[in-house]
Image: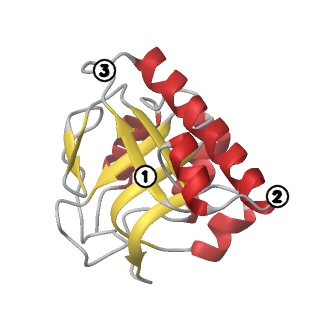
Amino acid sequence: DMDPSFVTGILEAIFDNVPRGAMMVITTSGFNGSGAFGELMGTTARYYCGSVGAVVDGPIRDIPRLLEIDFPVWARGSIPTDSVGRAQLSGVNQVIDCGGIRVKPGDIVFADRDGVVVIPVSEVDVRKVLKLSAERVHDERRSRQEIREGRSLKEVYEKYGRL
């Protein structure tokens, strides 16, 4: 059996380093034999850390409970097996590969039902990215409205340059 102080030390290393309002990003480095995230981690992340969600490049568990606490998690799949004795922590707040994307601490992570986007803060002008994103959302809303009003796809495409 694992020493309980070792386990709590690992969890403290994780959760004491999650900034309020942050999206947690976790990689299993390809290991899919146990859940890398579940109800207790989600509860701690949401209520202790103030995290807004998690992206897990591996399986998770306790999905109904995560939904109950309204903690969104994007993952590769689910598995009933916990990670005790099956997986180990290799680092916190370091550069990782998550789903083939390099993620660094401080990067902006946006996720919705369509997927996950990572904005590398050190490589782009974040204000410009946010401005362009807002413009695109505005254009998509206008496009949708114009199509509802009877404009053709061709007309809408010519006006906005995308569908």
Instruction: Please state if 97 lies on the left or on the right of 93 as rendered.
Output: left
Badge 1 crowding class, 10 Å Cα cut-off, few under 14, some 14 to 19, many 20 or more, is few
Q: CA distance from mark 1 to mark 3?
A: 17 Å
- The mark closer to the camera, 3 or 2, is 2
Where is residue 71 shown, x and y percent of the image? 64, 55
- The residue where tag 2 is placed is 149
How far across and how far down the image is residue 75, in percent?
Answer: 42, 66
Residue 8 visible here = no
Q: Quadrant of residue 99?
A: bottom left
Residue 65 place in picture, x, y as percent: 66, 70
Q: Nearer the viewer, mark 1 or mark 3?
A: 3
Tag 1's secondary structure? Answer: strand
Give, as a three-letter code, the residue at label 2.
Glu
Which residue position holds label 3? 124
Residue 160's image quarter? Answer: top right
Q: CA distance from mark 3 to mark 2?
A: 37 Å
